Image (tube, rainbow, N blue to C red):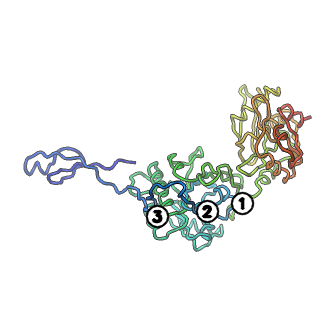
Amino acid sequence: MKPRPTVWRCQECGFVSPKPGTCPDCKRASGALMPLVEERQATDRAPHRPDTLRTRPAPLRDITVEQGDRVTTRIGELDRVLGGGVVRGSLVLIGGDPGIGKSTLLLQAARALAEAAPPVLYVTAEESTAQVKLRADRLGVATDGLLLWVETDLAAVEAEIDTVKPRALVVDSIQTVFLPGLESAPGSVTQVRECAARLMTIAKGRGIATFLVGHVTKDGAIAGPRVLEHLVDTVLYFEGDAHQGYRILRAVKNRFGSTNEIGVFQMSTAGLHEVTNPSGLFLAERSHDAPGSVIVSSLEGTRPVLLELQALVTRASFGTVRRTVLGADYNRVCLLLAVLEKRAGLPLGMQDVFVNVAGGARITEPAADLGVVLAAASSFTDRAVPGDLLVVGEVGLTGEVRAVTALDARLKEAAALGFRRAIVPAGNVAESRALPLPTKGVATIHEAMRLVFD
């Protein structure tokens, strides 16, 4: 925050100067040299603190939690990521690439909130009312409880909130609104920080569920100061491939729920549609019995998702080999390739290896390690992994296969999609009595390769 402006004042006649020195008026009148005294002017940028936030310390046992503070958006995938619905007084930040569908998602959510708890104020600082109206007509949004306003002055928005008294507020986007008391331009670090702090005060003080749209940088992170993500209650990232029709909503911070849940949407001309069976979506176009293709199970929160993991191993054309990884952790894949070469004896040192998670999805958990190993071995030997086989397991540096969590849920999802068998860690087989699929437990990658290829 910039310091308050400083002036120098004459204590005799009140003359004000922007620089230190002596008073010229007193010198002309009496010939006396009257020094100017430094003063700091008061600023009107002090944050407004509503009376509702002025509380006194209280014992923890005397604090009560109000029931019914969550309002569902009627978009099941969004409610799942938020932890069950929108919390009254929460501040949610949504980021994503341009054109990914952030405004579309919030407009659909605003429609549901306007029908459940009107009114909802939608402040757009980037588009005109005609542009938003065209999108609303395409999505079929026509409710009286949704108020649209084009405004970039956050002070004017705060004044209008006192008049409208909305139950929910959408600001699109935080980088384009500004406070007139600040000299910096909209989108600067100072403006973004102060505007976010003002909106947080409004949300908490008036109990308004607030959504903010955030721009992202070239690296995919939300633009602006890091304190922006610390101020808000929930940070969501809207991801997806521009050439694919699906979108993934992922929480990286959530004070009211888990950060492991994801929401999957399908983009169409009529807006975003929920995908209740993401496994079927990601496996719809897979090729059966193709070398280098393995089906693995990734646990996203409480939801198991089956994904196709592909590997291509080919002779290196130049002296330096290539390792290209899409959708998985590059360092972990390189580690698994080293284990495969050292423990299984596959000469991958002079081979280019390309690993891809089909459909543009991402795998972040170690349960897909065994799938990476078998996919690379399948491509190198040109021997296919059976299409009805599910592979689950974490691989250690000595080649051992370690147990994974929630195996029953993973196998139940695979059985529902028609898979007939699974290769799992031996430790999980010893712990489980009855599993939804016929399973073979393996303790090392040698056993897994013998089961698959022999």
Q: Quadrant of the C terminus?
A: top right
> Nearer the N terminus, badge 3 or badge 2?
2
Q: Residue visible at 85% across and 31% down?
A: 446
Q: Residue furthest right?
A: 454
Q: Which mark is residue 274?
A: 1
- Please indicate whether residue 171 sits to the left or right of residue 342 in the image: left
Q: How far apart, in angstroms, are the residues tagged by discs 3 and 2?
A: 24 Å
Q: Is residue 398 left or right of residue 43?
A: right
CB within 8 Å, label 1 to label 3: no
Instruction: In this rendered view, identify the residue nearer to me: 22 or 366.
Output: 366
**Residue 2: percent from left, percent from top:** 37, 48
Task: Specify whether residue 352 is in view.
Answer: no
SS under mark 2: strand
Q: In the rendered image, which residue does mark 3 sit on?
A: 157
Residue type at the position of mark 1 = Glu
Q: Nearer the viewer, mark 2 or mark 1?
A: 2
Residue 41, x across and y down, in percent = 29, 52
Residue 148 position within the rendered picture, expressed as x and y whole percent measured from the top left: 54, 68
- Left or right of residue 404, residue 450 in this image: right
Lower position in the chain sequence, tag 2 or tag 1: 2
Mark earlier in primary sequence (1, 3):
3
- Please tell me the numbered disc located at residue 51: none
**Quick check: 161 left or right of 100?**
left
Nearer the observer, 369 or 269: 369
- Callout 3: SS: helix
Residue 359 visible (yes or no)? yes
